[in-house]
Amino acid sequence: MDLTTDLAGIKLRNPTMLAAGILGISSSLLNRIYEAGAGCVITKSIGPVPRPGYSNPCIVEVPGGYLNAMGLPNPGIEIFLEELNELNQMKIPTVVSIFADNETKFANIARIVEEKGALGIELNISCPHAEVASIGQNPIITKRVVEAVKHAVSIPIFVKLTPNVTDIVEIAVAAEKAGADGLTAINTVRSMALDIYSKTPILSNKYGGLSGPAIKPIAIRCIYDIYESVKIPLIGVGGILSWQDAIEFFLAGASAVQIGTGIRYRGLSIFQEICKGIQEYLKNEKYSSLSEIIGVAHRA
Ligand code: DHB
């Protein structure tokens, strides 16, 4: 069955995407993900200037997932353009994740990546611990950033939302009103792990973001709630390891899914396995297209 997906005007060969952050920005690595079957790839977030990130330890395994605080390490927009150029030459559909500390810088980076051939932009306003984390926790600042980027570019803008708020729907609605073309939910869950012998937080940054199967029910709840209040397409992310997990996100209201930590558990074949499972499920449940199951849980 055909799984091609139209996401706010972006045509994908299937609804699986590499989640931002998980495998960096190198064109050769992102190419491997695309070859392995992902519908498109999303880069690690790119900022205005180079950032070294935090010192180690910056990742720790916990039951149900991983806690990380990398510190948004990236080479800065100028150097990144070399990779984007290669990704374009290899014809890898690439959505560039970007971050900045104000709307002018967000718009500047967005303009540059559009000009250099990005398919779309994902706004990371939701890192669970960096200084820029607070943007996505405030509907007014979210609106300001999304409006500025919308004004600057014409490629689709996806806004990645944080679960670390009282009401994620309020932020989702603010982003939609400001012109977002789609919403990605959720970013990692702010969390902490302690070493019981040193009696201190394990991560150098103390706080990190939890990813993996432990956060899937939180992500499903967020997609379910957001779906009831916005019209733009949703991209579900958080703890997807199997095709069954992906189906759950579609039923909740997602039009596509992102896979990150799942690669650690299932390897690169996860993209093909999920696509195959979705196709068989649709056939067995007597649907003729993926779009027929999006949001079906709301009719119950
Ligand atoms: C970073 C970590 C995250 O878990 C996240 O969701 C975004 C950014 C980071 O530290 O780079």
Image: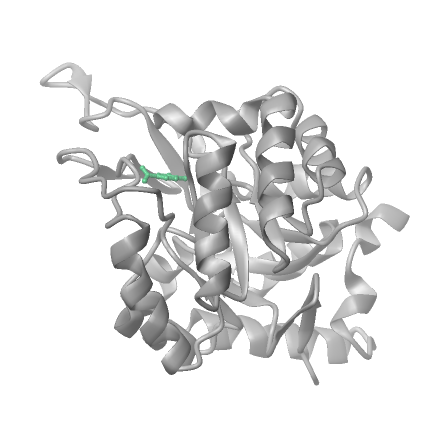
Q: Residue furthest left?
A: 198
Query: Residue shown at 79%/53% (left/top)?
Result: 295
Asked if residue 186 is positioned above or below residue 11 in the image, the reply reads above
242 with respect to 21 (left or right): right
User: How many marks on residues?
Assistant: 0
278 to the left or right of 201: right
Can you see residue 185?
Answer: no
Give percent across and percent down for residue 149.
58, 44
User: Which of the 4 image quadrants contains residue 52?
Assistant: top left
Q: Residue furthest right?
A: 299
Residue at point 58% right, 59% down?
A: 257
Q: Percent position (x, y) of residue 171?
A: 66, 29
Q: Is 128 left, or right, of 27 in this rendering?
A: right
Q: Along the line of sight, which residue is nearer the eye, 177 or 277?
A: 177
Work out which residue is located at the far bottom of the displayed protein and give it.
Answer: 1
Quarter of the image with the N terminus is bottom right
Front in this rendered view, residue 210 or 244: 210
Residue in the picture at 79% in, 63% down = 293
For the question of whether residue 186 can be seen, the reply is: yes
Q: Position of residue 251 (x, y in %)?
A: 74, 55
The colour style of the image is one colour
For ligand 1, which image quadrant applies?
A: top left
Which residue occupies the foreground of this view, 73 or 34?
Answer: 73
Q: Nearer the viewer, residue 82 or 256?
A: 82
The x, y position of residue 255, in whole percent, is 69, 60
* Above or below for 265 versus 10: above
Say if 111 sits above or below 290 in the image. Answer: above
